[in-house]
Amino acid sequence: MRKRVWTLSPFFIIFSVVMLAMAVVTYYYNPIVSIVELCVAAASIAIVLIWSIRFKKYMIKTISNSISNITDINQSYLERFKMPVAVVGKFGDILWTNMRFKKQLCMGRNPVNDNISTFIGSNNIEDVSDGEGFDINFDGKQYTVYCTQASEGYICFYYDNTYYKEISKKYAETRKSVALFVFDNFEEFANDSEEESARVMLTLETKLLHYANENNALFKKLPSNRYMMIFDKSSLDKQISLKFPILKEIHTIKFNNRVATISVGIGCECDTLIESEQKAKKALDMALGRGGDQVAIMKDKNYEFYGGTSAGVETLNKVRTRVIATSITRAVSESDRVYIMGHRFSDLDCVGSAIGLQAVVEKELKKQCRIVVDKSTSMASNLIDTFDENIFVVPEEALKSISPRTLLIIVDTHIPDFVESSEVLEKSKRIVVIDHHRKMVNFISNSIVFFHEPNSSSTSEMVTELITYLGDTHITKNHAMALLAGIMLDTKNFVLRTGVRTFEAAAFLRKKGADTVATKSLFSDSIETYKEKYKVVSDAEVVNNCAIAVADTDDPNIRLIAAQAADELLSVSNVNASFVLFKTDDTINISARSYGKLNVQLVMEKLGGGGHQNMAAAQLKNITYDQAKYQLQEAINSLVTEIYSDSSKS
């Protein structure tokens, strides 16, 4: 009967509303009939209210009785629990709660017949039952909820751990992180008068001290123009959200058209300050290896980078080159043979630096040396053809003679996945790395010598400097031409990334007989390649001052075509960067170029690639040209937005 009344209640309510409306209308025609209709409506409403109250009591009684059907439940025992407890039916309806549940979660109200979803957040009780517990925030308090399954329902226990959560949060916020700062271009300013040099250093240290005070950080000056700060995590998180404005602040220090920059390495989320400092040192090495003027944060084994949009600073001091040359000499003398290997699809810089180094190792250091290269995929086949083919070996041949004492010198790359042969790298136990590309996270970490100069124009420039210390008596005209070709390629004929040391290296090679006309002939292409290049250029479109083109051709020289087309597109007015997409197997490759107005390295890193500020690349697998172009445009827009945001703040 009660159920029938409850089912009919909506109809009674509708009937009452209609009777009230009719009574209002009828009043103007017949007041007596109107009064009768009002009485009928009032009676209908009264019946609904009475039966609703009785039905609610009936439901509470029924639910209370149904809890006895659930075994494993002892209400008197659960009532004595010092935490909120709720007994829930198999469909999620609350059947019973203890007084603590009513007081703490319901402000004294009886929640019986409510659904438990109100008290377990977005969790499904079937999914979390008999689990490890889950956390919820409810009415300003934090609970860990444990749900266990009974015979015909569930029992939920609410553990109030607000106090411990707040302690844990406070501990996390006050956890210490070590930051190491270094003045990137101290040597440049040190060449000025002592008075100006002292003024710059005082200004720099004042800004760093002010920055430390603003962030409640401990500040300490270290030797060699380095500084240390110790941050709370809350202060570090704030700086991360602001993208470290201290980088822009240091840029305001200027003298004689030079702008001061700093590099920062931060180690965080460590158990001890010693561990944090060790990570900070690794992070600082990474920041410097990527060209400086940026912040590198090391968390666990992962890195985060901020800044790095400006060009690197050339180092004039050659002491490190001399020390590296001594280390390489020692490593060669302790080996039985030497192999030199570059990256896949080797170019003139890769092959040219390898040729110059091979001549020195074999003729000056008197150690058998061969260059590991796959000529069929090389973009420097013209250069390879000008030398004795006996100095080159394919990877399969090199693998046969590698021993534990064999020395492998990697040139023009420091990434294991980019080398000509990963098998040769894996089998070699003694490795030397010589590279100028900005440092990436997954670098070759087991090298005995790691000669990395991200501010050099090319690996050929680095090798040329090494040769002056290793010995140059056997460097012939052809060797000098090979090294000069590498420098000319990466500097775009001495336009990009050239410094004092670049021209010193070129002058040395010219002195050794390098013929610029003959060197230029190494860059010549066939008429078919020339036509394909300009077809790609003619089909390019400009978006956000960036030229984007697709080289959809089966030409075997597609890599060379794409690289040259990207270079050519930079000559178009109002183009700050160029990107050429081409396909090999199931991979879309992107060749990126810039004259410095847009850091293409940062764009390519957003797509999983890398390189230099002016020259970079990326590879995207198993996608179409349209999908690749969309991802590229998103990466460009993201970087442009970041740059615009930073410039507006500054």
Image (tube, rainbow, N blue to C red):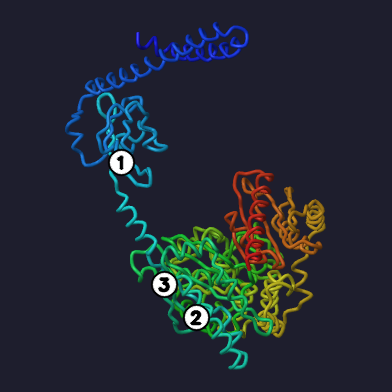
* Mark 2, residue position: 329
* Mark 1, residue position: 104
Q: Earlier in the sequence, mark 2 or mark 3?
A: 3
Q: Quadrant of the N terminus?
A: top left
* Mark 3, residue position: 230
**Mark 1 or 3: the one toward you:** 1
Q: Is residue 348 left or right of residue 401?
A: right
**Mark 2 or 3: the one toward you:** 3
Q: Residue at x 55, y 9 (%)?
A: 34
The vertical placement of 115 against 624, above or below, is: above
Q: Earlier in the sequence, mark 2 or mark 1?
A: 1
The answer to which quarter of the image holds residue 486 is bottom right
Q: Which mark identifies residue 612?
A: none
Kindly state the secondary structure of the residue where label 2 is placed: helix
Q: CA distance from mark 1 to mark 3?
A: 41 Å
Of residue 296 and residue 69, the one placed in the foreground of this image is 69
Residue 515, position as x, y percentages in the image = 76, 78
Q: Residues within 10 Å of mark 1 (few under 14, many from 20)?
A: some
Residue 58, position as x, y percentages in the image = 30, 17
The answer to which quarter of the image holds residue 53 is top left
Q: Is residue 224 left or right of residue 571?
A: left
Mark 1 residue type: Gln
Of residue 492 and residue 271, the one placed in the foreground of this image is 271
